[in-house]
Image: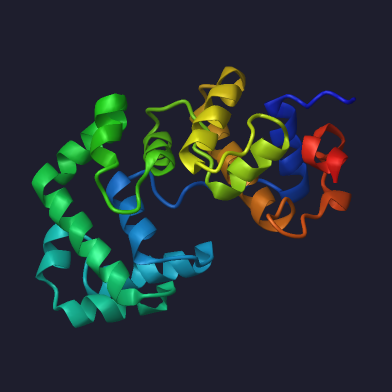
Amino acid sequence: MPARPKLKATVAALEKLYGKPAPFPSNDPWELILRENASYLVDDATREEVFSSLKARVGVSPETILGAPYERLVESIREGGMRPRMRADKLVEAAELAGKTGLAELRKLAKGGGPGARKVLKRFPGIGEPGADKLLLAAGSAVTLAPDSNGLRVLVRLGYAKEDANYAKTYRAAAEAVAPELSDDRAWLVAAHQLLRRHGQETCRRSEPRCEVCPLAKGCDFARES
């Protein structure tokens, strides 16, 4: 049985397949929180368009979001997917939390990292454990892949963890298993995150995965068993 390739080899193979990945759109935790909540189940290009619309029509400070007419807030993010009012409510909730914490303190916490920062970040809507890890990765204070659901699926299929009905349990198991192979190079970690995410979206899909064209298939538990 072929051994699973090391993570660096996996990332290199994915970069050869997809090219150099785009960086995160921001390293600012507040801007990333807004992007997470302004849109739902849309592609990255749409997510950026919606964020730009929010910025132009309402503003992105907690004060402008809280002070904006509710219908204007809804309209500014309408193209961001399902249930625009629900998303607007999340933006208001996030703005209220940011106002209490203070943006300067929020950014300081993200840059400092650690359990205290994670605890604060996870209070925001849409930010669970994976989301908090991503914000800390973006800020450069955590050595983590912070895989989204697509990237996590790739790691599970490669054998880093077994899929559990409890998503958080699967996430933690994969994070612990892959940790010894991580570099403290933030740029590499972000690239790895982005490439695993794209691979899960386009090739290692939940349904109808394209194992026949996957460069990782030889070392993949899932491909061997399919």
Answer whether residue 61 is visible to the viewer in this image: no
Q: Is residue 121 above or below residue 89?
A: above
Q: Is residue 72 above or below residue 141?
A: below
Q: Position of residue 200 (x, y in %)?
A: 66, 50
Drawn side of residue 24 relative to residue 209, left or right: left
Q: How is the image coloured?
A: rainbow
Answer whether residue 127 is visible to the viewer in this image: yes
Q: Is residue 9 above or below residue 28?
A: above
State the residue at coordinates (73%, 35%). Answer: 158
State the residue at coordinates (60%, 44%). Answer: 151
Q: Position of residue 107 (x, y in %)?
A: 24, 39
Is the N terminus in the top left, top right, bottom left or bottom right quadrant? top right
State the residue at coordinates (82%, 47%). Answer: 214
Q: Quadrant of residue 53?
A: bottom left
Q: Quadrant of residue 219?
A: top right
Name the residue furthest top: 180
Observer-nearest of 163 and 141: 163
Q: Position of residue 84 (x, y in %)?
A: 33, 75
Q: Position of residue 35 (x, y in %)?
A: 37, 59
Q: Quadrant of residue 179?
A: top right
Name the residue furthest front: 165
State the residue at coordinates (75%, 29%). Answer: 9
Q: Is residue 206 above or below residue 146?
A: below
- In this figure, what is the number of numbered marks? 0
Observer-nearest of 117 and 155: 155
Drawn side of residue 76 relative to residue 10, left or right: left
